[in-house]
Image (tube, grey):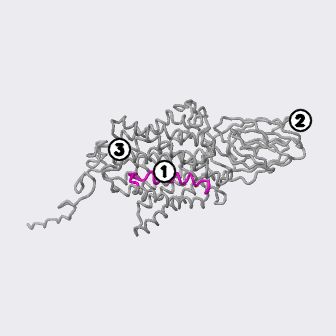
Amino acid sequence: RVTTAALHGPPRFPSFRTFRTTQGKVITKKMAAVFALGARPVGELRVIAQSNVSRPRITRVTCRPVPAARGRVAGAAMPGMPVSRGVSVKLSAFEHKRVELSSTYSLATTEATTPSSPETKAAVPASSRIAVPAFAFSAAVLAMSPAGPASAAATAVATINQADTAWVLISTALVLFMTIPGLSAFYAGIVKRKNMLSVLMQCFSITCVMTLLWYGVGYSLCFSEMGNGVLGGLDKVFLQGITKASIWETIPEALWALYQMTFAIITPALMVGSFVERMKFSAVMWYSTLWMFAVYFPACHMVWGPGGAMAAAGVLDFAGGIVVHITAGIGALVGAMVLGPRKENKMVPGNLVLTVLGTGMLWVGWYGFNGGSALSAGADAAFACLATQIAAATAAMVWTAQDVLETGKASMLGIATGSIAGLATVTPCAGFVGPAGACVLGVAAGVVCRYFSLVLKEKFGYDDSLDVFGVHGVGGFVGTCLLGIVAAPALGGFNFSTSVGQQTVIQCVAAVGTAVYTAVASYVLLLLVKKIVGGDLRVPASAEQGEGLDQYCHGEQCYTLSHGELEGGQPVDVPGWNTAVTAPEPVAT
């Protein structure tokens, strides 16, 4: 039987939801501790660790008493933890997390009390240490006897894992690389040449502003433990209390704050794609800043933060399907509808090569986006990266196949957009699915996202200029809703804690609720920003149709206009230009 456990440690550590013994008794708790196991005569514990920070990991531990320890069966396991004499602990069927031999934890002496015998102190020899999957930092040990339960508590001290730290450092750089220059180049190459610099400027400026905003209040509002289920507290404003000794799971907390900062940077930058070629620079910056407070910070805390409401409800979001893609996609859609269509609504890519380069940067950077969200250099990260690659490639080919069927030609812009759709769709599921599930997600992304981007957009007439809603919003929504299906063990997934139907309902409710709230909040913010910037969110029609946003907003040009180009940036035939000039015949002397 499993009864109770003594808990230690702050609530940001992983919470273990379901405890099941071989006898079938289930105890559900939210715990800021590692598990404890006491059994009679043999106990087996299979745990899925569902944390707001770390991703689900699975382990099975079997505790068996030896004859000398009859009446005192106590076992606990974590990296470097000592075990009591007289207890045989067998590890089996643990997966998705390598055995950590380098982590060191110190554990206090365990005490066990048996009602039928005097109080006994279980000696803990320093040499008796075992290594098991490292997915928590706080330990709780339970002692049981045949006659009744007895409790014992111990506190473990976490240490930094260098491999995990190195991987998250690399992932942090990759995610920042996704925004500057990846996303910037991807967007800039699709717009007209007279507007390219404005897109680059908006993405670069958002990177700077969101960095300062995250440092000031963003991290605290998302990951403070002093708040409620919707927002964190203000005890970590300006990163107060974060020192070199501060640890988040197995990495420095400073690194965790930096890694999450890159997510806060790219989310509002995604929305820029719906405002291009018509929205004032000041309006973009005001909207992005206010939107973070109204939408991103609450969503991030509810899904990933300590005590978040969505996490408590069982919502799974591995790397940002809800937090990043649904919020950004809906915020972009509302912005596009409030702004209205462009005066020159025809798609005229200024530099498709730049878009292709940006696509490659985004694809590579997504390894840090999804793989880094495992927060460990192990099988979790490997499976997340594997799913990312397969889903992106599948979606790209499905999109291209439809292009060929409809037009007879394979489009470079189409295959690039399809790959991004696959990446967005797999994001919420990356660490929960196997290769088969990733293929399913890729097919869904290639079909559904393309339909929204090319068919529904034309039907309803909204000018989602660079398909932010159609690719990121719809992709994140589809991935979130399909998570319960593709993460099922039948498809090679790793979600053993809930049934397919139950998890699907949870995911769909979260996705719809997030979309509705984001739509309302975004609309209100745009009305507010309209007043702040002087009553109009758009640049004048003369600038939009004439000189372009580069010159109007920034007084600069991405390309120097010269022979053969109009102010619109498109080449024209000029008599005498770009024609071969015959050299004069040499004059005989």
Between 457 and 378, the one lying in front of the other is 457
- Position of the C terminus by quadrant: bottom left
Query: Badge 3: few (under 14), some or many (20 or more) residues near its Cα, within 10 Å?
Result: many
Q: Which of marks 1 and 3 is nearer the N terminus?
A: 3
Q: Which residue is drawn at 82% across and 47% down?
A: 88
Q: Is the magenta stretch mostly helix, strand or loop?
A: helix
Q: Would you say residue 388 sits in the magenta stretch? A: no
Disc marking residue 473:
1
Residue 155 vertical position relative to residue 274 in the rendered view, above or below: above
Asked which secondary structure carries label 3, the reply is loop
Q: Please tell me in which quadrant of the rendered image residue 30 appears.
A: top right
- Amino acid marked by disc 2: Pro
> Label 2 vs label 1: CA separation?
60 Å
- Find residue 548 and name its label: none
Residue 403 appears in which quarter of the rendering?
A: bottom left
Determine which residue is flagged by label 3: 279
The residue wearing badge 2 is 115
Query: For the N terminus, which image quadrant?
Result: top right
Q: Where is residue 17 in the image (x, y as percent from the top left)?
A: 69, 44
Proximity of marks 1 and 3: CB atoms separated by less than 8 Å: no
For disc 1, the neighbor class at 10 Å (few under 14, some 14 to 19, many from 20) is many
Q: Residue furthest left?
A: 589
For the question of whether residue 173 can be seen, the reply is no
The magenta region covers 460-486
> Is the Cβ of the residue at disc 2 closer than 8 Å to that at disc 1?
no
> Residue flagged by tag 1: what amino acid is it?
Gly
Label 1 and label 3: CA atoms lie apart by 20 Å
Locate residue 97, reporting x and y percent: 66, 51
Towards the viewer: 468 or 378: 468
Residue in the picture at 65% in, 51% down: 502
Q: Which of marks 2 and 3 is in front?
A: 3
